[in-house]
Image (cartoon, rainbow, N blue to C red):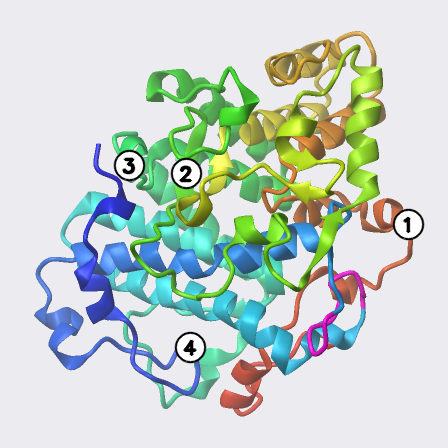
Amino acid sequence: MIKIKTISIVAISMLLMTACENELDQTPPVELESSALTNFDGVLNAAYYYHTGVVTPQAVMGEFRADNITFDDEPPYPDFHKYNSDLGGLAISEIFFRPFYSNLYKSILSANNVIDNSDDATQVAEAQFLRGLSYFKLVLAFGDVTLNLSPSPDSSDLTLLTRQPAADIYTTVIIPDLTNAIAGLDNSGLGSGRASKIAAQSLLGKVYMFLNDFPNAKIALENAVNAASGAGVSLEPDFANVVIDESSEIIFATQISSSISNSAGGTIFSGWFQGGDTKADEQNITLSLIEAFDANSTAGGGTDLREALTIDVEARKGVKYLGGLDQDFIELRLSDVILMYAEALNETNSPASTVLPLLDPIRTRAGLTSLTGTASSQTDVRAAIAQERRLELALEGHRWFDLVRTGTVDTTMGQTIDSNYYVFPIPPSEVLASGGVITQNPGY
């Protein structure tokens, strides 16, 4: 089936937003105003496309801020492991936080256009998925954010830029959008890289996990796990294949193509993990991650096969991604969903005898023995799942966000970190362009 990345997206170049003072002060060119459009394919493709400029900063924030990989202190770019105001500087913001922020709002604006104006119910549901995904990423990175649900916001009304509480973004947009996407989508889009019902179920479950709403997370994730086989989603037998574009366990990925420039530019995420950017340490994999793999091998009755397929221990570089400039960024895959489901079951007091067997297929693939019978308390099972998530999903952009979600930042990082630095700085250029209506996060 033809993937989005192989489609000629000429319409995207026509839909690139005009120059503006801030990222919400954007409208398509006059000839492409929503009132003149009858076909929204290009607008919807644009909503997908803008995520290509999001995934590299997303991956760097998720891994280099945590304990898996290190960021070189290369002036004027500060070390991601310094939990102070340094990340609020203009230089680092312009290459990381502004592309992340601006491209998500561009995706949202395109999605709003489709949701408000398209007569195609499937297009609307896809756009709702993408808008929910975009706002979820914004809230994880920045906390409170500006809310815009209009395809044509009034650029003269700066009050629209006022940041809204993250809790309201979840209840007003993210959860309703994903719920509507579940109702409006089937799984026919899986083979073409588009949003699908199982992707919306999985993402909704993940959203509830970040809200610590484990009963609702359990329902959504159970629906996704149960739907996997019928949707043609299954665990890859060989861990070497879990992140290739053709992986059978991919539920949703942002597709990257060397033939279409991404919407941010610069070194793509896979290059960062391989030490291919000067701001990444030449030996950037932490000893902590290496030791975690080794300890898992010892405890698991064999060699954790994932280690050699994720990192080069001697060179201390990532080797998980082999797709070069065409490497897709996996947003959701089945292992991730299974591990979240196991966690939700544990947090809703399911017994270890029910929870731990869910990890068996993942561990068997890694060459490890079952954990069944090795832990019984909720605390021990929680720790086992957290360890499995770290190693299974290493270098996939989850780690920092998982630590924040589970309240284990200080314990894991071995220091007391001000919670102001659990989130990242709003791009200073956005604060300035709004005349201060958009406020900066405390500490930055």
Q: Which residue is mark 1?
A: 414
According to the image, label 2 marks what residue? 252
Position in image of residue 67 (x %, y %): 78, 47
In the rendered image, is residue 420 in sight?
yes
Q: Amino acid at mark 1?
A: Gly
Disc ID at residue 23: 4
Cα gap from disc 1 to disc 3, whole angstroms: 44 Å
- Mark nearest the camera among 4 and 3 is 4
Residue 14 location in percent, x, y? Answer: 20, 70
Gap in angstroms between the C-alphas marked 4 and 3? 29 Å
Region in magenta? 74-83
Local SS, label 3: loop
For the residues marked 2 and 1, what is the alpha-carbon distance in whole angstroms? 34 Å
Amino acid at pointer 3: Leu
Q: Which residue is found at the position 70% from the left and 78% from the top?
A: 76
Residue 234 in picture, x, y percent from top left = 44, 19
Main SS of residues in magenta: loop
- The reply to whether discs 4 and 3 touch (Cβ–Cβ < 8 Å) is no
Of mark 4 and mark 3, the one earlier in the sequence is 4
User: Which badge, 1 or 3, comes first in the chain's sequence?
Assistant: 3
Sequence order check: which comes first, mark 2 or mark 3? 3
> 197 or 397: which is nearer to us?
397
N-terminal of the two: label 4 or label 2?
4
Residue 85 is one of the magenta-drawn residues: no
Give amino acid for label 4: Glu
The residue that disc 3 covers is 185
